[in-house]
Amino acid sequence: MADKFSNEEKFSASRNPLDFIPKRLRNSLFLFDTSISELINLILVQNPKKSVSFDLISNRIIQKTQNTIAPFLLVLFNNCLRKGIFPNCFKVAQVTPLHKGGERLDRNSYRPISLLPALGKLLEKIILVRVLNFFDKHSLLSTHQFGFRPKFTTEYAILDVYEKLIYNLDNGLTSCTIFLDLAKAFDSVSHDILLKKLEKYGVRGNALALFTSYLDSRSQFIKLGEVNSSTLPIDFGVPQGSILGPLLFLIYINDLPLATNFFIKLYADDAVLCAQNEDLKALETEVNFELDKVWAWLFSNKLTLNIKKSKCMIISKKRKKQSIRVTIDGSELEQCSSYKYLGVIFDKNLNWKPHINHLCIKLARACGCLVKIRNCVSTETLREIYHALIHSYLRYGIIVWGNAKKTTIQPLITLINRAVRIMSFAPFGQIDLKAIFKEFRLLDMDQIFTLESANFMYKRNVGLLPTKVGEYFEKRALSTHSFSLRRRPTNTHSQIKYKTSIGENCIQIRGDKLWCDVPKTIQDSMSLSSFKKLFKEHLLSLT
């Protein structure tokens, strides 16, 4: 394998960043005019409670005067689209430092909140609709990118990584998972490179001129209390607090998966890389070779890696400690036993103990809060607090970690039961907790896992999942069957083969098994909200 790598064509860190994009799209984006109806609809969906920028024109004012100002805005915005000009008055950001904890004299204790003019953000939304439609039509955004996209969520990114690791374990492969931390990625975007990438993706003519104008001559000032700083230019990065900024960053980083043979998962600037092999030495060689490619892409695109915060983790069925030396640009990555990725803590054994221990700390604090306030608020308020401080943490990512061993999950179950006892003023001892759960219309641990897994399966069966996630089930060749997607036969899970008991944990297997237990009338629900409501009632009825 080492010979194979050494014989491959050498790559240079000074490569043209456009070389990673294989071909130039022949089609071009056309920014068609907006209309009064589109403009009014966009005005109506604006959040009236959003903070106002330096021009003091709020969304509330725009909504109250929409019938008067809409015709004038229509002329202004259409001229911007036709001539490729983004007004300079919309490109000034008011930055307010928000204290996030720590020493008040330490600037690192503040989070900058960037406020842009509301009218400018309205124009950005008009542009965004057209660019997104164009990119979706030509499937330009990478399927490996889960950030800032309709249907894609952090939970699906977590699930995608987990499914890959489970597949490797089931096939006797050792995985090296690398968690990359990009230093200030959004603020490091090169405007010149971004505009060249936009051109290659079909943004040309007036559309490219508009984006050039949008990025050019941007500035910001700091507002602290009643004092404003001087205005300074912004020459790098996508505009913070903007509508188009997240999409522009996705476009900038879109070709990273093409630069490497790693399994790669992106959620905006959060990147997970994974390689696998039966032989540990071969795995080390492959990982370091591919990391050189990743570094070449980062260097060419003027992005910086935070080496200290980037980690690697070895996941294997072998009991003997597995260790390899992973380096990038001459610096060695620290090997960790667990890592918090998008709010869920992955561990080297995939037993979820670190994550569940983390949840136990949060739930213990929530129980303390319930004890302090239960005599001061109504039962309904207690129930709302339970959902905010306990249920929300339990349901997040549970389709991944919820199938942990019962002994691992038991501390969570104990804390949930404690919370329910506190809310109901029930004495400690042997009582019928199931009746209390039902009275408060709360689901227990197993029921939350079942409901969230069933919701996932419903989304899959009616086409509400991203294409990338839906691919988990492609092996079943559903087109050969005549049954409805919502009424799947009870033995569909048998079509997926797994080699060990580990393989049973994949969503394909347990998802189909669970779906078979959902009553047919509930499977045929006309909407996701209806399905959630009916299936929750079904679970409560079984209590």
Image: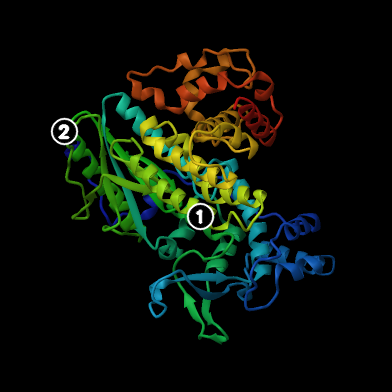
- Left or right: residue 34 compared with residue 504: right
Residue at figure coordinates x 22%, y 46% from the top left: 10
Relative image position of residue 371 (x, y in whole percent): 52, 54
Q: Tag on residue 320?
A: 2
Looking at the rendered image, the disc whose residue lies closer to the viewer, 2 or 1, is: 2
- Left or right: residue 100 compared with residue 131: left
Residue at figure coordinates x 42%, y 31% from the top left: 403
The image shows residue 404, relative to residue 48, as above or below, that is above
Q: Report if residue 218 is visible in the image.
A: no
Three-letter amino acid code of the residue under disc 2:
Lys
The residue identified by callout 1 is 198
Three-letter amino acid code of the residue under disc 1:
Leu
Total count of labels: 2
Q: Which corner quadrant of the image does residue 204 belong to?
A: bottom right
- Contact check, label 2 and label 1, Cβ < 8 Å: no
- Left or right: residue 450 compared with residue 337: right
